[in-house]
Amino acid sequence: MRRKKQLDFSEIQAGAALWQLGKQPDSPRAKRVFRILELFVAGKYFGELSGLLSRYRWANLIDTDGKPYLQPPPDAHLSDEDFQEYSAVRALLDLAARDGGLTRVRRCLHCRNWFMALKRSDQVFCNEPGRFCRQDFHAADELVHETKLATMKENYKIKRRLLLKERERLGLRRRNAKK
Ligand SMILES: [Zn+2]
């Protein structure tokens, strides 16, 4: 029996859009889309989210199978980047319209980039080409552990040194006292 989750178009499209936007996370359009996503995921559906969504204008179209879909109006004359932003937002809206539709949209535990957990439902690291977040995360974890250990050792050394100094001082005092 085939157990692998069937991916649908919106999930793939959202994944691709997030990946594209993640290349320039500081661009205004990436910031807008990520903020929309953040608000959806946080369940903050009103106020700021409505304001952000109001900048997009949609035309209601019907595809050849009779299914309605949203598209930027043909007269909007969007640049490629704008179109990309629209596609990202539309994909997210499609997902948000379903129960649990956004559960696979996550932030990487290491690089904090948004990604779509397309392969596994328990995926917590992005698997962007050229990035090794899972390995880096564990390496960083190990480094923290090692640093803690080193600090503890160093603290012990310092304390021991102070103790010896103090004993020496007391010893000198005692010697002085004998005089
Ligand atoms: Zn990552």
Image (cartoon, rainbow, N blue to C red):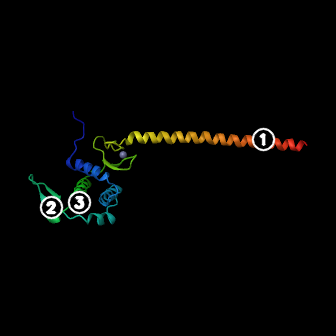
Label 1 packing within 10 angstroms: few (<14), some (14-19), many (20+): few
- Report which residue position mark 3 lands on: 82
**Residue type, numbered disc 3:** Asp
Alpha carbon of mark 1 to alpha carbon of mark 3: how far? 74 Å
Alpha carbon of mark 3 to alpha carbon of mark 2: how far? 18 Å
Closer to the camera in the image, 80 or 71: 80
Q: Position of residue 37 (x, y in %)?
A: 31, 56
Q: Position of residue 2 (x, y in %)?
A: 22, 35
Q: Is residue 71 left or right of residue 137?
A: left
| Label 3 vs 2, first from the N-terminus | 2
- Report which residue position mark 1 lands on: 168
Q: Could you tell me which secondary element the residue under label 3 belongs to?
A: helix
Residue situated furthest right in the rendering = 179
Which tag is nearer the camera, tag 1 or tag 2?
A: 1
The C terminus sits in image quarter: top right
Label 2 packing within 10 angstroms: few (<14), some (14-19), many (20+): few
Residue 97: quadrant of the picture: bottom left
**Residue type, numbered disc 1:** Glu
Q: Could you tell me which secondary element the residue under label 1 belongs to?
A: helix
| Label 1 vs 3, first from the N-terminus | 3
